[in-house]
Image: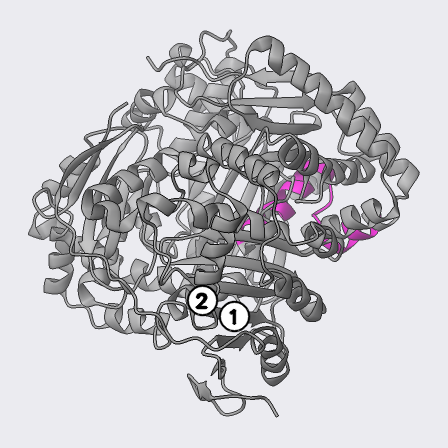
C-alpha cells in the first residue's frame, strides 16, 4: 500500500478526480493530472528556493547548480531520452528551480528513472564548474532586451531581496563542488520538492510510480518562506532598448495582482509589439508591461489613459487574463509548469484561484489595476540605448 | 466546352487542409503564399506588406479583428525568403468569422500610408537579438520603397492560385472548407503588377557583444530524394543535447550557450545551417576555432555508431509527429516551429506550398527510420566539409 499521509482530490467529477495531490510522509509532494488525449507526458520536479534564496555571497549558485544537475551524474541522460523522442530542460526562477522531462506516452518509466538521477548528490570537478561558468557567461550574451528591462525593474523594486536568478558571474566562477552540494542539500530537501506528472497516464499508477522517486528522501519540516518586502515605486534605467512599466503586486491570487495582469494585457492590445511578464508567486512581485522597439510610446499612453479608454479595455483585459491562465493549462508541459510552480510555494496554491479572482473582477477594481501602472505608482524603466 | 471547364477550374475554391484536434479550445487558420524572387527592395516590400495585411481592410478594422480572435491569436503576418504566412486563431464557433477575416486580409487590405510609415520609422532601427540577426541577414532597401512597391507585391502574392490554406483545432470534417468557400466567394483574381527592383544600401548597427557563426551548407531542393537524410544529419549534428555541436562546442569547448542545426527556407528550397553564438573573439581566433570545430565535428562523425543513428531518429520522429522546441524547422522568423496547434497548422500549409504535399509526421518519421548509419555519416560529413563558414558580427554601435 502506498504510504500516503494525505491524498486530496482537488476536483471531483463522476469518475476519477481530474488530478490527485499526494503529500508523502517525508513532506514531499506529488501531483498527477491525467490528460488522456495528449501525446506527451511531462514530468516536472520543482524545488522551492525556501532556505536558499539568492543573496550576494551565493548569487548564481542555484543557476550553476541547475546547469550541473541537468547534465546528470553519468552525462548520458540526454542520449537515453532523445533516443525515444524525449527531452530534458531546466530553469531557475526566483522562487524555485524546475527540471522538466518530456517523453512520449509510452515512456513514463524511462522519464521517472531519468528524473531520479536528478536527485543524486552532485559529482562535479572544479574543471567542470569552470566549463559551466564559461557557458553561463556566454548565456549572458544572449539576454534579450525584455529580460534586461525586467531585471532593472526587479532591482529597483525589491533590491537585494529579489536578486536576478541568472546570478553574479564572479560568484559563479568562484564556486567549488562543496558550495554547489551545500546549496543542493538545502534546496532539494523533501519538504521543498514537488513532482508533477501530467499527460496520458493512469492516475493511481503514475502516482504510485512517482512516489517511489521521492519516498526514500529523509523527512524534513517545511521551511518558512521569506516574503519579499513591499516594493517602492520609482524610476530606473536599463542597458537595453525599449521601456517598461512594472506594477508592484502582492501574491498571485490577490485581486490587486489579477487586476494588474488584466490591465497589462488590455493595454498591450492597444500598442504594437508589447510584452507582458508575470511569474506567479505567493510573495510580492511585479507585473511588467514593456516594449523593446522604442521609448516613450508606452509610458505616454499609460499616463494618458482616461476613464473612457479604460472602460473600453475592461472586458478585453479581463478576458485576456482568464485566457492567459487557461492557456497555461492546455498542455502537459503548461500544466506541470503552473501547478508545479505554485505548489512548490504553497500546498494550497492553484491556478483556479487566479481564475476565480479574475472572474469576480469589477470595473472599479480593473481601473485600480490600470492605475498601478501610472507614473507615481509603478516602476518606470527607461532603456538607456 | 474546354474553355468552360478551364474557367470552372480557375474559379474552384482553394482546398482547405483540415487538422482535427477535437479537444483544443480554438481553431487556427494559416494561409501560406509563395513569394517571387526577392531582391533588397522586394524583401523590404514584403516586410512592410506583412504589416499592412494585419491592419484595416474593407471588411474589418485592425481592432475588430483583434477582438474577434482569441487571446494570443490575433492576426499575424510575416515574410520569409520564400513565403508569406498569414495566421489567426478564433473560438471554434467563430470559424466563419475567422475565414472572413482571412479572406479580407488577403484580398482587400487598405494600403494605409500611416501604417507603412510607422513601420518604416521603427523597423530599421529595432534592436534584434544577435541570434535573430545572424539567422536573417538578408538586405532590405528600406530607403528606396514606394507605396506602389508594396501594393504591387500585395497583388502579386495574394492570389487564390498562389495559396495553401490549412485550419487546425476543434473542427468538424468539412467545416473549415465550407467556411472558406463562403468567405472567399467574392475574391476575384488579382492582377499582378510589375515589380520594381533595387540594390541594398546599409547594415543596421546593434549592441550585443556576441557573434553568430555558422557553417552554411549547399541548398537542397524540396524534391531532393536525400532531403530526409540531410534533415536527419542536421539533427544528429545540431538538434538536442546529445548532438555533436552541443557536445563539442558547448560541453567540450565551453564556447557557446546556444548552438543549433537550422533548416532555413530559400526561394527554391532549403539551406542546412549549423549555427552557434559566441562572445566576440579576434578574427584570427574565430577562424582558428571554426577550423578546429570543423575538424572536431568530422572526427565525431567518423565515430558515430548505431546509438547515434537511433538517437537522431528518435529525436527526428518526435519532432516530425509532435513538434519540438528544439526543432530545426525555422519556417518563421527567429524561432523554430514548436508543438503548438498554431505551428503545426502553419507547418502543414507551408510544406504543401513547398513540396506539393502537406506535412505528414508519420510519413516523415518513417522516412527518417529508413536511413542507415553510412548514409547518415555521408550526409553529415558532406554538410560539414562543404559548409561555408559565415560570420555574423555584431556591429559596434547603434546609430
Q: CA distance from mark 2 to mark 1?
A: 6 Å
Q: Secondary structure at mark 1?
A: strand
Q: Earlier in the sequence, mark 2 or mark 1?
A: 1
Residue at x-position 37% and y-position 25% = B127
Q: Which residues are magenta?
A: B342-367
Residue A40 visible in image: no
Q: Secondary structure at mark 2?
A: helix
Crowding around mark 1 (Cα neighbors within 10 Å: few <14, some 14 to 19, many 20+) is many
Look at the image and name its color scheme: one colour
The residue indicated by pointer 1 is A196
Main secondary structure of the magenta stretch: helix
Crowding around mark 2 (Cα neighbors within 10 Å: few <14, some 14 to 19, many 20+) is many
Q: Chain of mark 1?
A: A
Q: Chain of mark 2?
A: A
Q: Are marks 2 and 1 in contact (CB under 8 Å)?
A: yes
Residue B355 forms part of the magenta stretch? yes
**A159 with respect to B349 (left or right):** left
Looking at the picture, does residue A270 appear above or below residue A200? above
Residue A147, numbered circle: none
Residue at x-position 70% and y-position 48% = B359
Q: Position of residue A365 (x, y in %)?
A: 13, 64
Residue B286 visible in image: yes
In which quadrant of the rendered image does the C terminus of chain A lie?
top left
Looking at the picture, does residue A67 appear above or below residue B283? below
Residue A340, numbered circle: 2
**B211 with respect to A117 (left or right):** left
Looking at the picture, does residue A327 appear above or below residue B87? below
Residue at x-position 39% and y-position 76% = A221
Q: Position of residue B164 (x, y in %)?
A: 61, 43
Query: Which of the 4 quarters of the picture holds residue A350?
Result: bottom left
**B81 with respect to A276 (left or right):** right
Amino acid at each position: 500500500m502506498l504510504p500516503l499521509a494525505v491524498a486530496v482530490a482537488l476536483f471531483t467529477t463522476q469518475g476519477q478526480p481530474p488530478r490527485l495531490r499526494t503529500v508523502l510522509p517525508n513532506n514531499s509532494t506529488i501531483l498527477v493530472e491525467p490528460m488522456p488525449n495528449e501525446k506527451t507526458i511531462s514530468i516536472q520536479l520543482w524545488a522551492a528556493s525556501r532556505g536558499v534564496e539568492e543573496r550576494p555571497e551565493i548569487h548564481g549558485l542555484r543557476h550553476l547548480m541547475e546547469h550541473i544537475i541537468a547534465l546528470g551524474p553519468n552525462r548520458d541522460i540526454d542520449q537515453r531520452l532523445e533516443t525515444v523522442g524525449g527531452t530534458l530542460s531546466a530553469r531557475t526562477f526566483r522562487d524555485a528551480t524546475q527540471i522538466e522531462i518530456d517523453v512520449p506516452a509510452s515512456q513514463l518509466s524511462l522519464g521517472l528513472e531519468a528524473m531520479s538521477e536528478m536527485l543524486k548528490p552532485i559529482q562535479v570537478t572544479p574543471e567542470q564548474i569552470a566549463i559551466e561558468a564559461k557557458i553561463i557567461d556566454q548565456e549572458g550574451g544572449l539576454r534579450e532586451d525584455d529580460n534586461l528591462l525586467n531585471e532593472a525593474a526587479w532591482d529597483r523594486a525589491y533590491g537585494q531581496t529579489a536578486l536576478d536568478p541568472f546570478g553574479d558571474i564572479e560568484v559563479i566562477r568562484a564556486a567549488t563542488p562543496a558550495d554547489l552540494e551545500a546549496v543542493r542539500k538545502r534546496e532539494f530537501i523533501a519538504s521543498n520538492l514537488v513532482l508533477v506528472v501530467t499527460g496520458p497516464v493512469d492516475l493511481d499508477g503514475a502516482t504510485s510510480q512517482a512516489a517511489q522517486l521521492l519516498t526514500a528522501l529523509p523527512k524534513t519540516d517545511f521551511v518558512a518562506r521569506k516574503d519579499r518586502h513591499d516594493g517602492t515605486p520609482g524610476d530606473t534605467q536599463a542597458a537595453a532598448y525599449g521601456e517598461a512599466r512594472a506594477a508592484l503586486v502582492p501574491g498571485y491570487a490577490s485581486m490587486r495582482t489579477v487586476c494588474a495582469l488584466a490591465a497589462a494585457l488590455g493595454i498591450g492590445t492597444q500598442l504594437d509589439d508589447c510584452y507582458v511578464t508575470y511569474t506567479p508567486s505567493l510573495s510580492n512581485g511585479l507585473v511588467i508591461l514593456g516594449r523593446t522597439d522604442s521609448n516613450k510610446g508606452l509610458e505616454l499612453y499609460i499616463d494618458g489613459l482616461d476613464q473612457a479608454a479604460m472602460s473600453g479595455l475592461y472586458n478585453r483585459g479581463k478576458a485576456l487574463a482568464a485566457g492567459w491562465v487557461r492557456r497555461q493549462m492546455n498542455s502537459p508541459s503548461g500544466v506541470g509548469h503552473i501547478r508545479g510552480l505554485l505548489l512548490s510555494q504553497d500546498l494550497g496554491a492553484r491556478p483556479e484561484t487566479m481564475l476565480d479572482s479574475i472572474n469576480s473582477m469589477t470595473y472599479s477594481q480593473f481601473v485600480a489595476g490600470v492605475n498601478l501602472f501610472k507614473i507615481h505608482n509603478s516602476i518606470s524603466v527607461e532603456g538607456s540605448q | 466546352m474546354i474553355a468552360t471547364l478551364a474557367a470552372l477550374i480557375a474559379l474552384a475554391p482553394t482546398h482547405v487542409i483540415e487538422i482535427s484536434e477535437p479537444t483544443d479550445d480554438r481553431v487556427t487558420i494559416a494561409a501560406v503564399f509563395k513569394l517571387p524572387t526577392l531582391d533588397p527592395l522586394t524583401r523590404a516590400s514584403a516586410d512592410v506588406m506583412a504589416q499592412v495585411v494585419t491592419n484595416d481592410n474593407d471588411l474589418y478594422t485592425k481592432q475588430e479583428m483583434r477582438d474577434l480572435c482569441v487571446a494570443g491569436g490575433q492576426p499575424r503576418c510575416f515574410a520569409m525568403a520564400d513565403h508569406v504566412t498569414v495566421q489567426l486563431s478564433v473560438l471554434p464557433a467563430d470559424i466563419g468569422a475567422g475565414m472572413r477575416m482571412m479572406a479580407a486580409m488577403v484580398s482587400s487590405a487598405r494600403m494605409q500610408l500611416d501604417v507603412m510609415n510607422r513601420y518604416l520609422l521603427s523597423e530599421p532601427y529595432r534592436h534584434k537579438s544577435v541570434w535573430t540577426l545572424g539567422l536573417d541577414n538578408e538586405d532590405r532597401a528600406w530607403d528606396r520603397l514606394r507605396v506602389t512597391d508594396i501594393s504591387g507585391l500585395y497583388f502579386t502574392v495574394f492570389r487564390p492560385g498562389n495559396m495553401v490554406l490549412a485550419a487546425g483545432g476543434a473542427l468538424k470534417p468539412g467545416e473549415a472548407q465550407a467556411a472558406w468557400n463562403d468567405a472567399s466567394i467574392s475574391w476575384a483574381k488579382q492582377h499582378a503588377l510589375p515589380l520594381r527592383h533595387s540594390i541594398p544600401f546599409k547594415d543596421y548597427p546593434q549592441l550585443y557583444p556576441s557573434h553568430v557563426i555558422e557553417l552554411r551548407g549547399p541548398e537542397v531542393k524540396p524534391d531532393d530524394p536525400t532531403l530526409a537524410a540531410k534533415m536527419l544529419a542536421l539533427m544528429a549534428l545540431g538538434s538536442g543535447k546529445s548532438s555533436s555541436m552541443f557536445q563539442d562546442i558547448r560541453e567540450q569547448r565551453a564556447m557557446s550557450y546556444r548552438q543549433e542545426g537550422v533548416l532555413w527556407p530559400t526561394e527554391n528550397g532549403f539551406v542546412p545551417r549549423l549555427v552557434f553564438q559566441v562572445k566576440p573573439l579576434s578574427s584570427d581566433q574565430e577562424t582558428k576555432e571554426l577550423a578546429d570545430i570543423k575538424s572536431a565535428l568530422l572526427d565525431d562523425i567518423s565515430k558515430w555508431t548505431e546509438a547515434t543513428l537511433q538517437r537522431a531518429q528518435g529525436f527526428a520522429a518526435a519532432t516530425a509527429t509532435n513538434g519540438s522546441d528544439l526543432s530545426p524547422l525555422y519556417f518563421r522568423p527567429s524561432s523554430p516551429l514548436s508543438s503548438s496547434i498554431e505551428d503545426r497548422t502553419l507547418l502543414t500549409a507551408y510544406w504543401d506550398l513547398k513540396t506539393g504535399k502537406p506535412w505528414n509526421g508519420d510519413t516523415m518519421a518513417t522516412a527518417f527510420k529508413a536511413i542507415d548509419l553510412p548514409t547518415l555519416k555521408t550526409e553529415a560529413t558532406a554538410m560539414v566539409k562543404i559548409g561555408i563558414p559565415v560570420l555574423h558580427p555584431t556591429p559596434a554601435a547603434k546609430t
